[in-house]
Image (cartoon, rainbow, N blue to C red):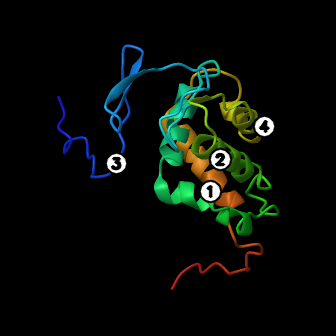
Amino acid sequence: DLTLYDARLIDGQRVLVEIEGHVIDPIFSRKKKFGISGKRRLGPGIAGLRNLGNTCFMNAAVQCLIGTPHLAEYFLNERHLRDINRVNPLGKQGKVADVFYDLVKKIWLDSTDCIAPIDFKWTVDKCFPNFGGFGQHDSQEFLSMLLDGLHEDLNRVTEKPYTTTIESD
């Protein structure tokens, strides 16, 4: 058993509880039938991601990132557009940032309760073949890869200056 303190919940943070196919909405204190009909929505930023095969590893990592307020705000306010680097040889020509932005918009702005991240998964398969297909993978490894992909696609350095290597002092 965890206390709210042990779970590191803070004032104003929303909590979604599912009990045997029902969702308890803490804001309205009433039960709602939970389905994937795409018709009910608890609020902005609260939407499930449908598993496409065994993609729960991907969905868990994506939900963590999209639920990070500053990161979600960065994309929702389209501030990422000024940072996209489509010429970075280490990046994916902005494809990862573009498809992540689309998914952030769907989760935060659409009115559906469950989203099938098909375009996101397709882009991941093309950009990161190690995570291709619909098999199970490690969530932490996926998260690391996704963060690196976003980092390189949003790296503002377009021309890295040459520096000489110092062999010793």
Q: Secondary structure at mark 1?
A: helix
- Where disc 2 sits, the SS reads helix
Q: Earlier along the polypeptide chain: callout 4 or callout 1?
A: 1
- Say which mark, if any, is on residue 105: 2
Q: Are marks 3 and 4 in contact (CB under 8 Å)?
A: no
- Residue drawn at the location 53% of the way across and 30% of the way down: 57
Residue denoted by label 1? 76
Q: Dot 4, how many residues are within 10 Å of its Cα: few (below 14), some (14-19), or many (20+)?
A: few
- For disc 3, the neighbor class at 10 Å (few under 14, some 14 to 19, many from 20) is few
Whether residues under marks 2 and 4 lie with C-beta atoms below 8 angstroms apart, the answer is: no
Q: Amino acid at mark 4?
A: Lys
**Label 4, label 1: how far apart the Cα atoms are:** 25 Å
Dividing the picture into quadrants, the one containing residue 167 is bottom right
SS category of the residue bearing label 3 = loop
Q: Secondary structure at mark 4?
A: helix
Which quadrant of the structure image shows residue 135? Answer: top right
**Residue beneath label 4, please?**
126
Amino acid type at mark 1: Leu
The reply to whether dot 2 and dot 1 touch (C-beta < 8 Å) is yes
Indicate the position of residue 23 as horizontal and vertical percent values: 40, 24
Q: Position of residue 43 (x, y in %)?
A: 49, 41
Q: Alpha-carbon distance for marks 3 and 1?
A: 19 Å
Q: Is residue 139 left or right of residue 83?
A: left
Q: Quadrant of the N terminus?
A: top left
Residue for point 59% across, 61% down: 74
Q: CA distance from mark 2 to mark 4?
A: 21 Å
Q: Residues within 10 Å of mark 2 (few under 14, many from 20)?
A: some
